[in-house]
Image (cartoon, grey):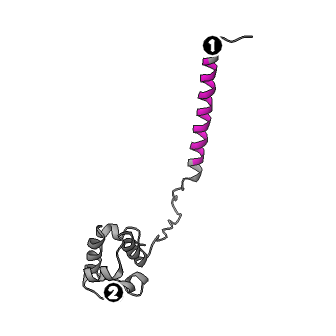
Amino acid sequence: MRLSIRELQTLLFYIVFVVLVVVLVALAIRALVSYPSTPTKGQAVSQTPSKTLAQALKDHRTRCKLTQEYVAGALGVPSQMVSKWETGESEPTMSNLSALAKTYGVTLAQLLQDVG
Protein backbone atom coordinates (compact mmCIF):
# COMPACT_ATOMS: atom_id res chain seq x y z
CA MET A 1 0.00 0.00 0.00
CA ARG A 2 1.47 3.24 -1.14
CA LEU A 3 0.34 6.60 0.23
CA SER A 4 0.18 9.76 -1.78
CA ILE A 5 1.88 12.97 -0.66
CA ARG A 6 -1.49 14.41 0.36
CA GLU A 7 -2.29 11.35 2.49
CA LEU A 8 1.15 11.49 4.13
CA GLN A 9 0.63 15.17 4.97
CA THR A 10 -2.77 14.43 6.49
CA LEU A 11 -1.37 11.54 8.51
CA LEU A 12 1.52 13.67 9.75
CA PHE A 13 -0.92 16.44 10.71
CA TYR A 14 -3.00 14.00 12.80
CA ILE A 15 0.09 12.59 14.50
CA VAL A 16 1.32 16.08 15.43
CA PHE A 17 -2.18 17.01 16.61
CA VAL A 18 -2.44 13.95 18.87
CA VAL A 19 1.04 14.58 20.32
CA LEU A 20 0.13 18.21 21.09
CA VAL A 21 -3.11 17.15 22.79
CA VAL A 22 -1.25 14.59 24.91
CA VAL A 23 1.38 17.16 25.91
CA LEU A 24 -1.27 19.75 26.82
CA VAL A 25 -3.21 17.24 28.90
CA ALA A 26 -0.02 16.19 30.69
CA LEU A 27 0.84 19.84 31.44
CA ALA A 28 -2.68 20.50 32.71
CA ILE A 29 -2.54 17.48 35.02
CA ARG A 30 0.88 18.53 36.28
CA ALA A 31 -0.39 22.05 37.00
CA LEU A 32 -3.47 20.79 38.82
CA VAL A 33 -1.44 18.41 40.96
CA SER A 34 1.01 21.12 42.00
CA TYR A 35 -1.69 23.80 42.54
CA PRO A 36 -2.27 24.34 46.25
CA SER A 37 -5.70 23.28 47.36
CA THR A 38 -7.98 25.79 48.99
CA PRO A 39 -9.04 24.94 52.51
CA THR A 40 -12.54 23.63 52.96
CA LYS A 41 -14.86 24.55 55.78
CA GLY A 42 -13.36 23.49 59.08
CA GLN A 43 -9.76 23.44 57.82
CA ALA A 44 -7.41 25.96 59.32
CA VAL A 45 -5.67 28.34 56.96
CA SER A 46 -1.98 28.38 57.70
CA GLN A 47 -0.42 31.74 57.14
CA THR A 48 3.26 31.67 57.80
CA PRO A 49 4.89 35.06 57.60
CA SER A 50 7.42 35.15 54.86
CA LYS A 51 9.53 37.87 56.47
CA THR A 52 10.06 39.67 59.71
CA LEU A 53 10.02 43.45 59.75
CA ALA A 54 13.78 43.40 60.33
CA GLN A 55 14.35 41.24 57.24
CA ALA A 56 12.08 43.41 55.11
CA LEU A 57 13.89 46.59 56.16
CA LYS A 58 17.29 45.10 55.41
CA ASP A 59 16.11 43.67 52.06
CA HIS A 60 14.80 47.05 50.93
CA ARG A 61 17.97 48.84 52.02
CA THR A 62 20.26 46.38 50.26
CA ARG A 63 18.02 46.41 47.15
CA CYS A 64 18.55 50.17 47.02
CA LYS A 65 22.29 49.67 47.62
CA LEU A 66 22.26 52.03 50.59
CA THR A 67 24.36 51.83 53.73
CA GLN A 68 22.94 51.91 57.24
CA GLU A 69 24.81 55.16 57.76
CA TYR A 70 23.17 56.77 54.74
CA VAL A 71 19.69 55.67 55.84
CA ALA A 72 20.37 56.92 59.36
CA GLY A 73 21.47 60.29 58.02
CA ALA A 74 18.40 60.57 55.79
CA LEU A 75 16.13 59.87 58.77
CA GLY A 76 18.13 61.87 61.31
CA VAL A 77 18.70 58.92 63.63
CA PRO A 78 21.92 57.23 64.80
CA SER A 79 23.22 54.44 62.56
CA GLN A 80 23.00 52.07 65.55
CA MET A 81 19.22 52.61 65.48
CA VAL A 82 19.02 51.40 61.86
CA SER A 83 21.15 48.41 62.84
CA LYS A 84 18.79 47.58 65.71
CA TRP A 85 15.79 47.79 63.37
CA GLU A 86 17.45 45.39 60.93
CA THR A 87 18.43 42.90 63.62
CA GLY A 88 15.04 42.99 65.31
CA GLU A 89 16.34 44.44 68.58
CA SER A 90 13.86 47.32 68.23
CA GLU A 91 11.22 48.51 65.81
CA PRO A 92 10.90 51.89 64.09
CA THR A 93 8.05 54.24 64.88
CA MET A 94 5.33 54.80 62.30
CA SER A 95 6.89 58.11 61.30
CA ASN A 96 10.24 56.39 60.84
CA LEU A 97 8.57 53.60 58.82
CA SER A 98 7.03 56.22 56.56
CA ALA A 99 10.41 57.92 56.16
CA LEU A 100 12.07 54.56 55.43
CA ALA A 101 9.50 53.81 52.73
CA LYS A 102 10.13 57.20 51.15
CA THR A 103 13.91 56.68 51.33
CA TYR A 104 13.58 53.26 49.67
CA GLY A 105 11.23 54.62 47.00
CA VAL A 106 8.26 52.45 47.94
CA THR A 107 4.92 52.95 49.62
CA LEU A 108 4.45 52.01 53.24
CA ALA A 109 2.23 49.13 52.07
CA GLN A 110 5.00 47.84 49.79
CA LEU A 111 7.53 48.14 52.59
CA LEU A 112 5.37 45.99 54.86
CA GLN A 113 3.95 43.75 52.14
CA ASP A 114 5.67 40.47 53.06
CA VAL A 115 5.86 41.09 56.81
CA GLY A 116 3.87 38.58 58.83
Q: Mark 2 or mark 1, which is nearer the start of the sequence?
A: 1
* x, y percent for residue 48: 49, 70
Q: In this view, does 68 lie to the left or right of 98?
A: right
Camera-side residue: 106 or 43? Answer: 106
Q: Which residue is drawn at 51% across and 60% down?
A: 41
Calculate the distance from the C-alpha at mark 1 to the C-alpha at mark 2: 79 Å
Task: Tell me the kind of residue under disc 2.
Answer: Ser
SS at mark 1 in the image = helix
- Quadrant of the rendering where the C terminus is positioned: bottom left
Q: Indicate the quadrant containing the N terminus: top left, top right, bottom left or bottom right.
A: top right
Relative image position of residue 53 (x, y in whole percent): 40, 77
| Residue 16 counted in the magenta span | yes
Part of the protein shown in magenta: 9-30
Q: In this view, does 101 lie above or below 23?
A: below
Residue at x 58%, y 53% (from the top left corner): 34
Where is residue 40? Give x, y as percent: 52, 58
Task: Give whichever of 11, 30 is nearer the camera.
Answer: 11
- Which residue was labeled with disc 2? 79
- Vertical position of residue 27 compared to residue 36: above or below: above
Residue found at x 41% / y 79%: 54
Q: Residue 5 carries which label?
A: 1
Pick the front one: 30 or 39? 30
Residue 42 position, x and y percent, is 52, 63
- Going by the numbered disc 1, the residue's amino acid type is Ile
